[in-house]
Amino acid sequence: MDQAAGRVQTVEDEISGIDLDDRRLEHRSIKFCRRIAAEPALGFPQAMVTPAELEGCYRLLGNDKVTPEAILAPHFRATVERAAERGTVLAVYDSSEFRFNGEGRDGLGAVTKSGNAFWGHFCLAVSADGKRDPLGVLGLKTWVRDGSPTPSSARKKGATYAEVRKLPCEQDRWFETAMAVEKLVAGSASVVHVMDSEADDFDLLLQLDDAQSRFVVRSGYDRALIDLVDGTDSSKKLRTFLGKAEVIAERAVKLARRAKPVGGSLDKRRQPRDTRTAMLTFSATTAVIKRPCHAVERLSAGLPINVVCVREKNPPAGVEPIDWFLLTTEPIDTEEQVLRIVDYYRARWLIEEYFRAIKSGCAFQKRQLETKKTILNALAFFVPVAWALLRMRTLSCSAGTASNRARPLRDPDQDSQEGDRPSASRQFLVVGGLPCCRPTRRSHKKQWSTRLAGFRSRL
Ligand SMILES: [Mn+2]
């Protein structure tokens, strides 16, 4: 704990190697990072000590030499160093939308028809040893929806798959970021890419497999299969095929409560639920998934892949049972290996917490910045700060009384909807053993920042 806590105290270390080809700007960056790390949720006018410093902060964020790549480079390097100490790490990916209120912000795009928003696709490195220690961010790609045609909008207007494939596609972010991460950690650590069902795409799985990448991706479709033995079309689909596989382990698992999402999500997997103990069954097999008709024809016709299935036995009436299908390159020969794959996937939940650290812990969407450039530079400065907040939370968990094992199973696909927050907050505060009042829905945002600030002062 001491060594890790020492690191958390010095978020500054995550920026100190910054290279902007300008000593004065580098110094200003480090000072700026020190200010925002001291009290991450504070507005810039309050966080900067003098009017001159505030002015300097805006000039820094708007400076041509200051880019997200340059700001993030030292944090990426430090994260690779932490990954190297672990040997194998999980690279957990997900995207989040960042919305800003008020007048139009130069360079940002609409959410649907109006609004100011951009999207960020992140890779968070997490230790693979079962402790789920967040090691830092290894990749970030941001984009704006500017109304230009997308593959799905073009399809609706009657374009063919061949035409559609030439358009820039948001789906490409998964592979691009994964390859950038592989390049960063090459020679330092072995990476297992962990992605939710949004990433379940034949091209992506095949590309990752071709690149000899290790992965655990949740399946989003009941895929057609090819017969493992003679290569002909199988009459069975993935779910039916897995249904026949032998159950190799059973575990009673306590499921965490999930609140009703704001606006009522129609997503079947994100429905509210009460705490309950579920009997989960685990099975695994190898299957050959078939190339879908719209995939590029030069791709091979099928991809042999290991599939791990987690299902709930005798779910109570009226609840959505646990039903995960994980597609993976990891071996499935023993019970231990199969359970490890499930554990890898469960670490995915941490990236949702990381988004909370940026949005609530650092109040990022409240920033009164007017251009895309300054907003994205500010995000890059908050990336290591939010990581430090998340890591403190993890340290508080492991230092607390509740063991990893005793914590309820959270749905790793749980999204960062407002309605999910109280339970996450309660878990953080209770497991962290921090002196706290009972968290309420209303005060949650405040707690993310103030409790962490209070905790930091005790480190
Ligand atoms: Mn997602």
Image: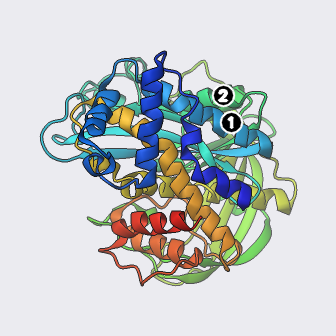
Q: Is residue 262 visible?
A: yes
Of the residues shown, which amino acid type is indicated by label 2? Leu
**Residue 205: percent from the left, percent from the top?**
62, 35
What is the residue that sits farthest to the right in this orientation?
334
- Between 360 and 35, the one lying in front of the other is 35
- Asked if the residue at tag 1 contacts the one at tag 2, i.e. Cβ–Cβ closer than 8 Å, the answer is yes
- Identify whether 200 is placed above or below 448: above
Tell me which corner region of the image, top left, top right, bottom left or bottom right, holds residue 447. Answer: bottom left
Upstream in sequence: badge 2 or badge 1: 1
Q: CA distance from mark 2 to mark 1?
A: 7 Å
Q: Secondary structure at mark 1?
A: helix
**Residue corresponding to mark 2:** 184
The C terminus, quarter of image: bottom right
Queried on whether the Cβ of the residue with tag 1 lies below 8 angstroms from ligand 1, the answer reads no
- Between 188 and 408, the one lying in front of the other is 188
Is 174 on the left or on the right of 366, as rendered? right
Tell me which corner region of the image, top left, top right, bottom left or bottom right, holds residue 273. Answer: bottom left
> Residue placed at 61% from the left, 63% from the top?
394
- Identify whether 323 is placed above or below 408: above
**Residue corresponding to mark 1:** 80
Tell me which corner region of the image, top left, top right, bottom left or bottom right, holds residue 109. Answer: top left
Is 414 on the left or on the right of 401, as rendered? left
**Residue 446: percent from the left, percent from the top?**
34, 67
Of the residues shown, which amino acid type is indicated by label 1? Val
The N terminus, quarter of image: bottom right
> Residue placed at 53% from the left, 63% from the top?
456
> Residue placed at 45% from the left, 69% from the top?
451
Q: How is the image coloured?
A: rainbow
